Every structure is written in C-alpha cells, then in structure tokens.
Image (cartoon, helix red, strand yellow):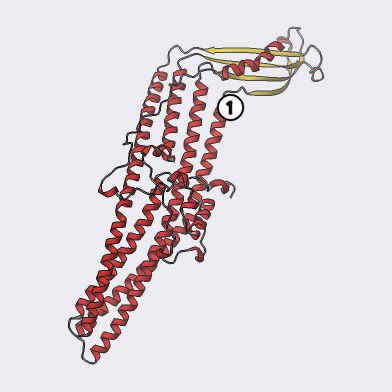
Amino acid sequence: MNRKLFLLPVVIVFFLGGCTLAPKYSRPDAPVPSAWPTGPAYRETKTAASAPASSELPWRKFFTDENLQKIIESALNQNRDLRITVLNVEKARAYYGIQRAELLPTVNAVGSGSKGRVPADLSTTGSAYTAEQYSVNLGISSWEIDFFGRIRSLKDKALEEYLATDQARRGAQMLLVSTVANAYINLAADRETMNLAKSTLETQETSYKMIRKRYEVGLASELDLLRVQSQVDTAKGNVARYIQLAAQDENALNLLVGSPMPPALLPSELSNVSPPGEISPGLSSELLLRRPDVLAAEHRLKAANANIGAARAAFFPRISLTATFGTASAELSGLFKDGSSTWNFAPQIIMPIFDARTWSAYDVTKVEKEISVAQYEKAIQTAFREVADALAVKGTVDRQIAAQQSLTDAVAETYRLSNARYNKGIDSYLSVLDAQRSLYAAQQGLIMLNLSRFANQMTLYNVLGGGSEGGLKNVSTNN
C-alpha cells in the first residue's frame, strides 16, 4: 500500500498533462476591409505620423484638461457600475478556480465512532453484547481521473469566460471614461449656450427699453414695441431652459462620478475646456482585434470551442478512484496501536452504452460555437462601423465649423447694419428682429459644432481602443 501511495502523485501529474478532445482553435477571418474607408468624408482624417495610436495613449495624456482628469479619476474610483463590473470579474475568477480544482483529488480526513447493543438472537455467540468501533481515515473520495480531458475542457471554458469578463471590465472602464468626458463637455456647452442666452436677453431688454422710449415720444410704432417684447419673452424662456439643462447635466455627471463634484472642477464654458490630444487611427483595421468588446467575444468563442471537448468526452468512459488509509479499533484507546491500520482502494469505471442526451448535448455545443463565431464577427463589424462613422465626422466637422463661423460673422454684420438702418429710420424694426434671431441661431449652431468636434474626438479615442489602462489600479472592491 505504501508503494501505491508513493506512486499516486506521479499518476496525478501524468493525467493532469493529458490530452483533450476540444477541436483546435483558429481565429475566424475578420469580415471587414483591412483598410479604413476613403472618400470625400475621410479626406482630412490623416494625422501626422508622430500622433500616437489610441490604444497606446493613456487617458491622462489624451484628456489634457486638468479638471476633467480629476473628475475621471474620481469616477474610476467611485462609480458603482464599474465597481459591480470589477466584482463580477472577481466572481468569474473564483468560478474558474473552482473548475480548475476539479482536476485535483479531494483529500478528506474522517474520524468516526459507533457504539451499539447487539441482541442475543443476532449475536454469533448467542448472547447479547455491546459493539464498539472507532476509526480515523485519510483518503480520496470519487476522484475522476481525466483520461479524455472532460474536466480540462470545462476548466478551459471557465478560464475563457473569466477572461471575457475581464475584457468586459476593460470595456466598462473605457465606456465610463468616455461617458464622463462627454458629460463634462455637454455641461460646458450648455453653460456656454446659457451664457449666450443671458447675453441675448440683456441685448433684447436694452432694445426694448430703447423702443419703449421711442414709442412714448411717437418715434416708434406699437407693433415694433410688441415685436421686441416677444423677443424678450423668448430670450427669457431660453435662459430658463438652459439653466435647467445645465443643472441636469451636472446631476448626470455627479451620478457617473458617484459623488457631488466641487463647483471649482466644473467647466464654465466649452471654449475654456482644453481640447483632447491628437490620435492616429493607423492604416489598418486590424487594431480593432484588440478592442475589449472584440477580445471578449473571442474569449467567449474559445469557451464555446472548449465546451465541445467536454461534450465529446461524454462519449468515453469515466474512471474514478476512491482510496483511504487509516486506523480502526474496537476500542478508542487502541486506534493508534500496532496492527490497527486499514486501507481501502476502489477504482470505478463507467462506460456509457446508450444515452441519447449526449448526442443532443454535443449538437448544442456545436451550434453554440457557430453562434459565438457570428457574435465575434458582428462585434468586429460593429467596431469597424463605429470607427468609420467617427472618421467621417472627423473628416468633415472642421469644414462645417469654418462654414458656420463664416455664417456667424456674416449674420453679426447683418445685424449691425440692420440696427444702424433702423436707427436712421431707413428700415423697420422687423429686419432687426430677423437679424437678431439669425445671429442667435448661428451662434448656437457654432457652439453645437464645437461640441460635436470635441465629442467625436473622444468617441474616436474610445472606439479605437483607448482609455482602458491606468485607471483601475486604485479601485478597491472594499470601497
């Protein structure tokens, strides 16, 4: 028996290094072009060769605004959704540890004792007696020796699911960084538009006072007074609306961060926010394969591939082993005396003869793999579309801003000339009102286009795989 116990670790190592019946994994070809799209919408998307790739640029270097950096750092440490995602990673890692431990035997120490009366008619001696038995055993209970890799395939599946969950954590971090940054610039844009609305209201109120004085002395009609009054009321409504939007933006940002932000960290206007850094999309779409969502889809595909090995192994025999050694005695004091040793060695083999469920289970695993392939390919196609859309905005937004700036300048001059002509009595006040409305709309449009440029730069950074590193080192699941 001692020789068998000596050989047991050797047997364990031998079988742990055995083969599996899982098919060899090969990554599917990416169902997207190898190069980014070209055309009029993309002609300005090429950046300088010195610009880093998104995946190589930590978010602290991409987001140059110091207040935004502090807010993102707080969100990474305090956001509850991210904390749940981190805990899910820990849970998946624990599940993997459980499945990996299935490869190893479970060793238990068992102590037992019994005492009972045997009646005379059941006794071999013809008289009643009290029977006692005590034992202490150390052994392995029903350890499955993984000849055909069933447990190893399940272990590999659990590993890939854990890795997929970890990539989901990276994706959640990237999304949080991007969402916080977008909430920050939305607040800045709405505050800038609110300031514009307040400035417009002041101008309208000044005009109203001037027209009212002219009306009182008979130099302006009642119609002009009513028209400027309508503009004042409209401006008041706009101010109230953007005060509301700015407050809601601040509430959204506080929810993302996980606590109220100090007012000193919040932006006053979009024009005061430092622009993000320049990034290069590169020449090849192959970098999409490093995105967390694509990597997570590939790990799920590998898990489905490993599950096929477990289903195949179900067609083969299962061998399990139960072995114990210890000591037993009819008296408690005799447990550890010479001659009280015991041992038990009970191997078992189960050979499947007929079980129709195994074929259906095998078919299920094959279909699940095909589903995972389709999901992996869809993840790549979605990633390509997101990058292409962001590049299309990047290639056209500067032209839109230039055109909008030229329009704003022209409308501002139109308003100045209309106001001068009205003051000289050449035109009616209607032309001044039209010019004011056009100027306000043009200025709003310019703010929105600048916001679009900011937001698209952040989106491009996110969809190219940036922002996934450098934030979770300080995240603690005990917070």
> Residue 82's x, y, as percent?
50, 47
Q: Which corner quadrant of the image does residue 18 belong to?
A: top right
The answer to which of 138 and 477 lies nearer the viewer is 477
Measuring 60% from the left and 12% from the top, which residue is drawn there?
A: 347
Q: Amino acid at mark 1?
A: Ala
Q: Which corner quadrant of the image does residue 429 belong to?
A: bottom left
Indicate whether 29 appears above or below 420: above
Residue that lies at the very extreme toward the top in this rendered image: 125
The answer to which of 390 and 196 lies nearer the viewer is 390
> Residue 232's x, y, as percent?
29, 77
**Quadrant of the frame with the N terminus:** top right
Residue 330 lies left or right of residue 425; in this view the side is: right
> Residue 5's x, y, as percent?
68, 14
Residue 79 lies left or right of residue 374; in this view the side is: right
Indicate whether 276 appears above or below 309: below
Measuring 32% from the left and 43% from the top, which residue is drawn there?
A: 385
Q: Say which residue label 1 marks.
A: 101
Indicate whether 291 appears above or below 356: below
Mark 1 element type: helix
